[in-house]
Amino acid sequence: MYDYNVWANKEMINRIKSLPKDLYHHDINVGFSSVSEVLSHIYLVEQTWFDIMKGQTMNAAMTTANQLKEQFEAKEIEEIEALYDDLSLKHRAFLVDQEDRDQGVLVDNPYAGPLETSIYESVLHVVTHGSYHRGNIATKIRQQGHPSVMQDYGLYLYKR
């Protein structure tokens, strides 16, 4: 599932790169204000959850993400692509090293309270969260008069 997530993010990033440059930061006040804001959000949540899986508290991981939010949203798509590539390499290595992906992960969510979950379920959360928000990006692209790109799991299965 994580490989699918990496592929889907790459498909969307490649589509964004093929569009007019001003589209990436263009303010559309529907949900997230811009494509760059949504893509940064996906990245920061993915980083947050992998920090949690590696043992950080949710508060600490979220604090780091919140400190980087504006900085990431201001970056150009090529910079974000490089950050995603680096993040996926680090997290693939982490996941390969896990002998037991059902290993417990305690999440002390400041909004929802404590949760006992697993590495596997945390990865599934990252994947479904990314899918949801890539849909937001697809909508924003269409609202600006451009077709999006297919990035569903079935297509991934055909292309891998």
Image: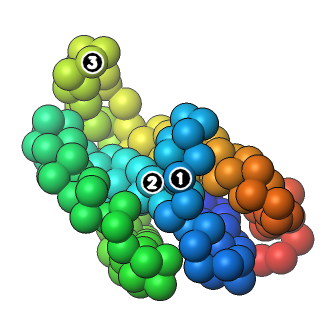
What residue would you read off at disc 3? Answer: 111
Q: Dividing the image into 4 quarters, which one contains the N terminus?
A: bottom right
Secondary element under disc 1, as helix, strand or loop, is loop
Secondary element under disc 3, as helix, strand or loop, is loop
Asked if residue 155 lies left or right of residue 13, the reply is right
What residue would you read off at disc 1? Answer: 27
Q: Residue at x 40, y 82 (%)?
A: 79
Dot 3: within a 10 Å radius of its alpha carbon, few (fewer than 14), some, or many (20 or more) residues? few
Regarding residue 78, the answer to whether it shows in the image is: yes
Relative depth, front residue between 16 and 49: 16
- Residue 29 on image: x %, y %: 56, 39
Relative depth, front residue between 32 and 107: 32
95 over 93 or under it: above or below: above
- Residue 76 on image: x %, y %: 43, 77
Q: CA distance from mark 1 to mark 3?
A: 28 Å
Q: Amino acid at mark 3?
A: Tyr
What residue would you read off at disc 2? Answer: 37
Figure label count: 3
Secondary element under disc 2, as helix, strand or loop, is helix
Of labels 3 and 2, earlier in sequence is 2
Asked if residue 104 lies left or right of residue 10, the reply is left
Q: Residue at x 79, y 55 (%)?
A: 142
Of labels 2 and 1, earlier in sequence is 1
Name the front one of labels 3 and 2: 2
Q: Residue at x 67, y 78 (%)?
A: 20
Q: CA distance from mark 2 to mark 1?
A: 9 Å
Q: Dividing the image into 4 quarters, which one contains the C terminus?
A: bottom right
Q: Residue at x 23, y 51 (%)?
A: 65
Asked if residue 24 lies left or right of residue 59, the reply is right
Regarding residue 100, the answer to whether it shows in the image is: no
